[in-house]
Amino acid sequence: MANVTVPIVVTFVVAAAVVGLMVTVSRLLGPRQMTAVKGEAFECGNPASGSAWGRFSVHFYLVALLFLVLDVEVVLLYPWAVELRSSGIAGLVEALFFIAVLGVGLIYAWRIGALDWD
Amino acid sequence: MSPGVLAAVQFSWLAVLPLGIVALAAVAVLLAGARAGQDQGEALGWFSAAALAAAALPVLASLGRSRLAFDGTVAVDAYSVYFELVILFASAMTVLISLRYVAEMGLAPGEYYALVLFAALGMMLMAAADDLILIFLGLETMSLAVYALAGFARRQARSAEAALKYFLLGAFSTGFLLYGIALIYGAAGTLKLEPLRAALAAGTDHRTLLLCGVGLVLIGFAFKVAAVPFHMWTPDAYEGAPTPIAGFMAVGVKLASFAAFLRVFGLHLGALAPTWTAVVWVVAALTMTAGNLIALAQQSLKRMLAYSAIAHAGYLLVGMAAGSNEAAGAILYYLLGYAFTNLGAFAVVVALERRGVEHESIADLRGLGARAPGLSAALALLLLSLTGMPPLAGFVGKLYLFKAALDSGLVWLVVIAVLNSVVSAYYYLRVLVAVYMQEGGVAVAPLAARPALLVAVGAAVLGTVLIGVFPAPYVAAAGAALRSALSLSSPGPLALIAR
Amino acid sequence: MSIDFAPLALLLLFPALGVVFHLFFGPHLGRHAVNVVGPGVIFAAFAVSLWALARLLTLPPGAALRLTLWHWIAAGGFRVDFALRCDALSAVMAAVVSGVGAFIHLYSVGYMHEDEDYARYFAYMNLFTLAMLVLVTASNLLLMFVGWEGVGLCSYLLIGFWYQRPGYAYNGRKAFIVNRVGDAGFVLGLLLIAGTLAGGGVLSFDFTALAAHRAALKPVAGAVCLLLFLGATGKSAQIPLYVWLPDAMVGPTPVSALIHAATMVTAGVYMVARLHFLYALSPAALLVVATVGALTSFFAATIALVQTDIKRVLAYSTISQIGYMFLGVGVGAFSAGIFHLYTHAFFKALLFLCAGAVIHALGGEQDMSRMGGLRRALPLTYWTMLAATLAIVAVPGFSGYFSKDLILEKTLGAGAGTLWLLGVVTAGLTSFYMFRLIFLTFHGETRLAGDRYRHLHDAPPVMAVALVVLALFSVGAGWVGLPPGFWWGDAFARFLAPATGALPEAAAGAAVGALAQLAPTLAMVTGLVWAWLFYLAFPGLPALLAARLAPLHALLWRKYYVDEAYDLVVSRPLFWLAERVLGGVVDAGLIDGLVDRTGLAVETGGELARLSETGNVQDYALVYLAGAVLIVGYYAYLVLR
């Protein structure tokens, strides 16, 4: 047991020591100057524009959610389509049932007015 | 298709007919309620209650025809019938309690009742499922609906907070449960409970995997029944949730969770009992003690009932730790009494709501005895039952539960439980002191003007007294339910756990 | 032999419906409805009891009707049913209870017509009747005890019915507490029976089972009988526990008539007769019963000689008459005791109702020294009360004559000469104080203040009906039990015999001389003459005698100082113990201290535990995780172990 464990432990210890050393040394030696640019939000390297707290219309979220409903539908229909023949009538019924359930969700969203942009 | 297969398929669909009724009703309420205003709200509520009542009929019809459906994933036995009936009752009570509340608090009725129905659907699935993944599906159906319901009064900060906390920890907990199920599958090679039981009996090469899986599933269930230390969300969630929903969470969620918990651990993981009863022992002791102690210091009736619900989960876990047939029967009976009593108590809190403002602090109750004698008497009776006063349901339940635990040799756990019952008397009776011996408080609208609520409180009181005074038929029903589930899973001698 | 007889349930159902009706609907539906339902349900029960009696008469002797309503207690092999059993004894008792009760209820309609609390009154009265019927028809000792306690409760409630008046509630409490002493004996007797029988493998309280297994009870029969008799002395107001009954007279007068004269107080006699097979096993216990009966009879009669409160005289008279009943059952003449119970129910109820009519007419006046000459103002009351008086003093031909003389005859026949002599003297005393009551109340010059005499009215029709009916029974009820050989002879005793049995020697009954048979009647005439001398011929005599024999008068007037003695010997030491030792030291110091400290510790624990609820969902998750790590760690430990 010991001959297996010892190398692993040694590895962990060495790794921890190296990381600790590097972080500590850079903290001790590195120069620190705060500038306005450094305080900005990081937006993939582009110059930041506008506030990070900008508002979106809530409709975007609704549309995104509705998209998700149909998206999931399509994703799950692919495997069924591939196996259409072997799953037979039962498979067809189940798939229709599945679509119907999602359809209910869409109808509901429609009825509460989630599709009206205004 | 051969006639045998056809019969099996027919039986399967018959078995889920109650679930189908509830699901269709939920969809109908959702769609009908999408543009409905408050004026149609009450009609939607009555429709929901009627659907829940209608679903009880096929449940009853399946009594006495115990077998497995859907290729061994759904159990149709007296056990599932028992729980489904109680769940349907609890859900219908919740709807009745909510009728006026939803209108006065300005909640969207269609979505509200649809979510209650969806939650009921999940709960029933949990009670009937004989397959880990189906239990998980039921649990998620229930949980997602209940998360939404907890935050339903979304303009209130504390309701939103309740939902968020409940959801975050619930999601966290789901991870544990699902991971546990995965590990068990890895070890036993099946998710169905019957084969799982057989596999455990035959022994497994992957004991490490299996035990880790059992531990994680145990954590998942412990969260759902609000056992210490997985209980921290409970008071916040109950306090913030709309009051009828708090009652629904305290009763319905607990019923369904214990139904699945007992079926999985008591009936099918009995072979591993020595490993989990010890954990449940500690959790039960902690749960009772923490629940009761913290309840002492509460000023809000709702919050106090939340801690009291934790404490009662602790008593029920005493039965789990005992792990005998008697204890399991006692758990079933206790849950029935608990359903009556707790729904009633929350209904009384709902009754205190007036013009869209909830009055739920114990100070608000002062002098209630003089202003609303009937309501006060109901509250007194329900609280006495929660305390465990004979001859009410709470007393008989505790009696059976503790006796079963004593018979299993859990003397110290019973001592802790009894001491806890004594402590609990303090905070229950403190409410009655406020009601009957102090002055002040707030006015309440007469209950007679709210017939649905009156019916709900009346049913709760009646049930609490009835099954307390005449416990025999209900104990017998609980026993029969248990035997039915046992005989379904193993035709051999009746024993949960060989001690 | 016993046959099922479902209508027995109606016997209990009617009064029970009455109770529910009065409690829940009475106050809303008003006086009229209550006045109909209150007596109505009791008349219905009376009809049922007559039905049962008639059914029983068609059956061969020794038959019984029975009905099992439900299984009441089942613990292991021990089972007690809520079951009724109606044999000759129970049928007679049920008929008396419901019959006399029905007319007293009717009378109450008139008596209570000015009271605001009529619904509560009739609820209690119906409840009492229900409990009394349970007592007399119970098929087992435990159910009988339920009735026993039930009538005690109703007695307590009705004595303190006017609880607003100072001292009334106290008297109710006194009755209750004194009865508890007796009941303690009763319960011990029950437990002794249960324990002894269980040792022999018999797990039942049924009277039939007790009778069948009485051989097993033989070793403890004496103790059981005495313990049960202690209960009887409480309920039936005998020495040493009679002190509550005179104070119970503060209740409404119909209550005194029903509970404290006709029915409840005779429950002890019924109990002894019901358990005659046990008492027959222990001659010593029977001797105690007979002696206590005779002594009580005598002492109570002496106290009654000087009392001036009309209801108090009747109360002591009741105690005295029940003493006769115990004398009867004590010498083994069980059916004779029950016979006297039966006749006494009519004439004593009537006496109380007449007294009530007098009190009612006089606006609450109970002191006989302020009455007199009421004969003309209240003729109906006078004649009915006179009939009852002639019955109680045992004028030949009136009901009391048949029963009281039968008891005395059996006493002498059993060879208890001293007790017989005591009984004869008591008969004289009875005659004296009863005629004293009649003379002081109805004869002579009126002592009413002012012109009140002219405004007196006799009882209203509804009360008058009850008086007349009961008067007819007081006169004629005794004719069902004539001496053997006359016409139908001792039909009553023959009817009861299978149910009550009798000791062999008492049944045989040594022949009693003619003089001895005449002695009670002579004593009665003597008492009448003395009463006439004292209160009609020479009205100054009583005061003169009271002055001359001041110590004796004081002794009787203060009722032998028994209340004072109990106060000194029992109450005060108990209160001292309760207040100083138990209250001051044990309770306030030890128990309260312990409780307070425990409570404080628990509350502190609660406050500390509450701190764990920070409201931070991160903290919640952390605690969750810690719990999860512990549990998974435990499983890891199990695996690696």
Image (tube, grey):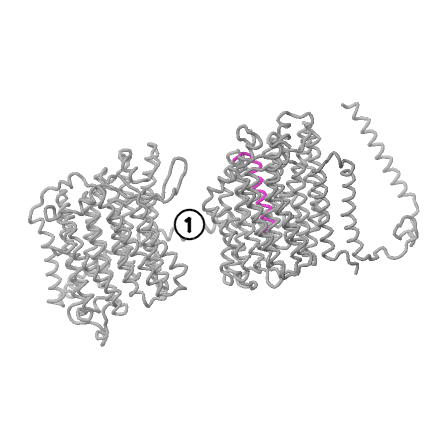
Q: Which residue is mark 1?
A: C582
Highlighted range, magenta = B305-325
| Residue in front for this viewpoint, B165 or B485 | B485
Instruction: Tell me where residue B368 appears, x and y as whole percent.
Output: 52, 61
Please name the predominant secondary structure of the magenta segment in the image: helix
User: Tag 1, which chain?
Assistant: C
At 88% from the left and 50% from the top, the residue drawn is A42
Instruction: Tell me where residue C448 appears, x and y as whole percent.
Output: 22, 72
Q: Residues within 10 Å of mark 1 (few under 14, many from 20)?
A: some
Hey, which quadrant is residue C435 in on the image? bottom left
**Horizontally, is B353 left or right of C57 in the view?**
right
Assess whether residue B175 is covered by the magenta stretch. no
Instruction: Tell me where residue C326 appears, x and y as whole percent.
Output: 21, 48
Q: What's the amino acid at mark 1?
A: Leu
Q: Is residue C161 above or below residue B493?
A: below
Considering the image in quadrants, where does the C terminus of chain B appear? top right
| Residue in front for this viewpoint, C424 or C508 | C508
Q: Is residue B231 visible?
A: yes
Q: Residue furthest left?
A: C514
